[in-house]
Image (cartoon, rainbow, N blue to C red):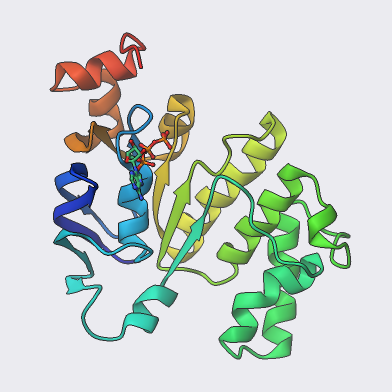
Amino acid sequence: MSSVTVENLTRIAGDRAILNNVNLKIDSGDIMAVIGPSGAGKTTLLRLINMLDIPDRGKVYIDGKDVWSGHIMETRMSMSMVFQKPIVFSMNVYDNIAYGLKLRHESKSKIEKRIKDVMELLDLSGKERQYAKDLSGGEAQRVAFARAYVLKPRILLLDEPTASLDPLNVAIIEKAVNDVNEKFGTTVIIVTHNLHQAKRLANKATFLYEGNLVETGSIEDIFNNPRDKRTKAFVTGDMVF
Ligand SMILES: Nc1ncnc2c1ncn2[C@@H]1O[C@H](COP(=O)(O)OP(=O)(O)OP(=O)(O)O)[C@@H](O)[C@H]1O
């Protein structure tokens, strides 16, 4: 539902650019996979887009507007992020998922309806009153995802959301990623080490290497017809890292 443009984005740590002059355009409604070896700068890119860090140089634009100018809270609230390690609050499952909706002062009936739907989608029905900290890792990640989903975010940022999950949990979350994209037109940016997952979910991909963006293209081009030899080595499994 929103486009994201990254322009000359640079993040310095110590004396090193961990993200170096990155330019990237993500069209509204795209599912963009961010791939690359460990330490390439994928999480750094996601955190800068999500305004969790401030760039040393360069800009992030949402729908053509610099995220750090204008209504910062509003811009922040148009995005949701799910991290690799499930984050749940010390309350029951229902209240976890309702958290952001309550902050936005949504009506009780709307909250109830949205939560019922998302609990079904993420196979959580019946767990409403369970204390979230007692959930298994997979259940906790589904709750974290549900909390992001119910907000119908314009942009959803996913940082290795299924890295430590079993295949059933992976399938449930991937289905919900497709669902949020199709139903609400949410633009999705997903960092993943799982190249099969990138191919299953994304229509575009971008390859990062040592802080530099090497190339961006359709999922078919990146996997079947990459322009750069480093991308080719990575997607064919020849890159040792
Ligand atoms: N705050 C920081 N201070 C110093 N170095 C950092 C900081 N944040 C990240 N780095 C370094 O920057 C590089 C890129 O980190 P980042 O987490 O973005 O990589 P990544 O591609 O997401 O890696 P992975 O796939 O292993 O999660 C790494 O070498 C990391 O150690």
Q: State the image coordinates of residue 117 (x, y, percent, origin top left).
A: 71, 66
Instruction: In this rendered view, identify the residue nearer to me: 10 or 203.
Output: 10
Instruction: In this rendered view, identify the residue nearer to me: 51 or 189.
Output: 51
- Specify the quadrant of the image occupied by residue 216: top left
Asked whether, in this view, residue 192 is left or right of residue 59, the answer is: right
The residue drawn where x is 34% and y is 33% is 39
- Specify the quadrant of the image occupied by residue 198: top left
Q: Is residue 168 above or below residue 21?
A: above
Badge count: 0
Q: Quadrant of the N terminus?
A: bottom left
The residue drawn where x is 29% and y is 60% is 28
The residue drawn where x is 25% and y is 36% is 218
Q: Is residue 135 above or below residue 34?
A: below
Is residue 203 in sight in this rendering?
Answer: no
Q: State the image coordinates of residue 184 (x, y, percent, origin top left).
A: 47, 65
Q: State the image coordinates of residue 146 (x, y, percent, origin top left).
A: 64, 61
Asked whether, in this view, residue 161 is left or right of residue 26, the answer is: right
Is residue 123 in sight in this rendering?
Answer: yes
Identity of the residue furthest to the top in this view: 238
The residue drawn where x is 60% and y is 69% is 150
Asked whether, in this view, residue 163 is left or right of residue 75, the answer is: right
Q: State the image coordinates of residue 214 (x, y, percent, origin top left).
A: 17, 32
Q: Is residue 165 above or below residue 84?
A: above
Q: Quadrant of the C terminus?
A: top left
Asked whether, in this view, residue 69 is left or right of residue 166, the answer is: left
- Specify the quadrant of the image occupied by residue 4: bottom left
In which of the image's four quarters is ligand 1 placed? Answer: top left
Identity of the residue furthest to the front in this view: 14
Instruction: In this rendered view, identify the residue nearer to me: 159 or 15.
Output: 15
